[in-house]
Image (tube, rainbow, N blue to C red):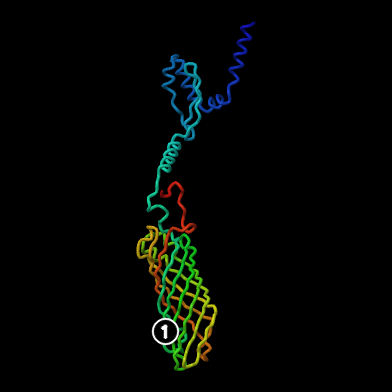
């Protein structure tokens, strides 16, 4: 009777297998059968240890729950190829240090800089005689990555000499101009060389100016000052003089503008002081501008 109760207790314990054992038994039956057979043939466990070979399931290496020489061992699934790749990547990133040439200095279109401009001007009104002059100025400019946003603030002085009714007239105009540029070929920056930088630099521009003008003619008895607004429409291009991929570069450019001045002259038949402006520009632009270039991961920043 006592032996029968003991046998029933042992049988019930064998039926209550752990969830892990039931999962592994169902999923890796072939592996367990192979090891069980080797254990019977080799009670010492040498063959069983030699046959603890992994079975591949869905690219994962899984090991069955093995009982060898009375010792139970359960292994968790491990993705060996991915784990090796991840460890290698972490080691590489941790040990990587960017060179000065990689420290966020490469040209992406995003720059900040200052420049000079100068050139000649012509009055659009052909009724004037000798309606030519000059223009000089300074400019601050900022561009975002790929030149999607391109804004400039400029101060300029324009001096013109012309004749009206046979009398010489001098006109001087100070202007503070806010300019916006559009680069239709901005994707050409992906060409990543001097030629494509020049092509991508081509722009159309529009600007609004605040003008302070003065007209003076001794023969006509005119000495007039006025303050008004003006409109600027233009186009141009620029080319880097040196490599823009070393943190910055000098850029040389050509810019044509049509200046529409709202201030009149007060001279009968000669009210228009609009000008054509033909300008050369020279500027220096730095690539190191926060928010205007793609930031590099902290692990790859130059130290």
With respect to residue 26, does 2 lie above or below?
Answer: above
Looking at the image, how many numbered discs can be counted on the residues? 1
Residue 55 on image: x %, y %: 46, 29
Q: Secondary structure at mark 1?
A: strand
Query: Where does residue 138 sit, x and y in percent of width and height?
Result: 44, 71
Please tell me whether residue 199 is drawn above or below residue 34 in the rendered image: below
Which of the two residues, 95 or 218, is positioned nearer the viewer here? 218
Answer above or below: position of 248 versus 157: above
User: What residue lies at 47% left-to-right and 73% top-to-bottom?
Assistant: 155
Q: Position of residue 253 (x, y in %)?
A: 39, 70
Q: Which residue is depicted at the point 46% across and 88% down?
A: 169
What residue is rendered at 49% in x and 93% in y? 220
Residue nearer the viewer, 49 or 41: 49
Residue at mark 1: 132
Which is nearer the eye, 13 or 284?
A: 284
Q: Which quadrant of the structure image shows residue 126?
A: bottom left
Q: For the N terminus, give its image quadrant.
A: top right
| Residue 135 picture location, percent across and down | 43, 78
Q: Quadrant of residue 22?
A: top right
Residue displayed at 53% across by 25% down: 25
Q: Residues within 10 Å of mark 1 (few under 14, many from 20)?
A: some
Query: In the rendered view, would you say 118 is above or below 287?
Result: below
Residue that sits furthest to the top in the current view: 1
């Amino acid at each position: 009777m006592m032996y029968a109760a003991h046998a029933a207790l042992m049988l019930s314990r064998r039926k209550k297998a752990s969830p892990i054992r039931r999962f592994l038994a169902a999923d890796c039956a072939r592996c367990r059968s192979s090891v069980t057979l080797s254990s019977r043939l080799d009670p010492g466990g040498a063959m069983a240890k030699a046959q603890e070979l992994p079975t591949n399931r869905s690219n994962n290496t899984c090991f069955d729950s093995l009982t060898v020489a009375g010792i139970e061992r359960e292994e968790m699934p491990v993705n060996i190829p991915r784990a090796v790749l991840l460890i290698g990547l972490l080691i590489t990133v941790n040990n990587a240090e960017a060179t000065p040439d990689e420290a966020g200095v490469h040209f992406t279109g995003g720059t900040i800089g200052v420049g000079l401009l100068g050139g000649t001007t012509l009055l659009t009104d052909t009724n004037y005689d000798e309606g030519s002059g000059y223009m000089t100025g300074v400019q601050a400019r900022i561009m975002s990555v790929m030149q999607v946003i391109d804004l400039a603030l400029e101060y300029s002085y324009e001096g013109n000499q012309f004749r009206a009714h046979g009398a010489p007239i001098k006109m001087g105009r100070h202007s503070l101009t806010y300019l916006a540029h559009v680069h239709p070929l901005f994707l050409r920056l992906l060409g990543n060389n001097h030629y494509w930088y020049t092509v991508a630099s081509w722009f159309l521009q529009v600007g609004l100016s605040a003008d302070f003008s003065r007209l003076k003619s001794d023969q006509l008895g005119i000495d007039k000052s006025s303050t008004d607004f003006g409109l600027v429409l233009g186009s141009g291009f620029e080319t880097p003089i040196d490599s823009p991929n070393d943190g910055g570069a000098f850029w040389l450019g050509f810019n044509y503008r049509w200046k529409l001045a709202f201030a009149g002259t007060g001279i009968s038949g000669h009210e228009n002081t609009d000008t054509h402006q033909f300008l050369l520009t020279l500027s220096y632009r730095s690539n190191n501008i926060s928010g205007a270039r793609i930031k590099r991961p902290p692990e790859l920043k130059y130290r």
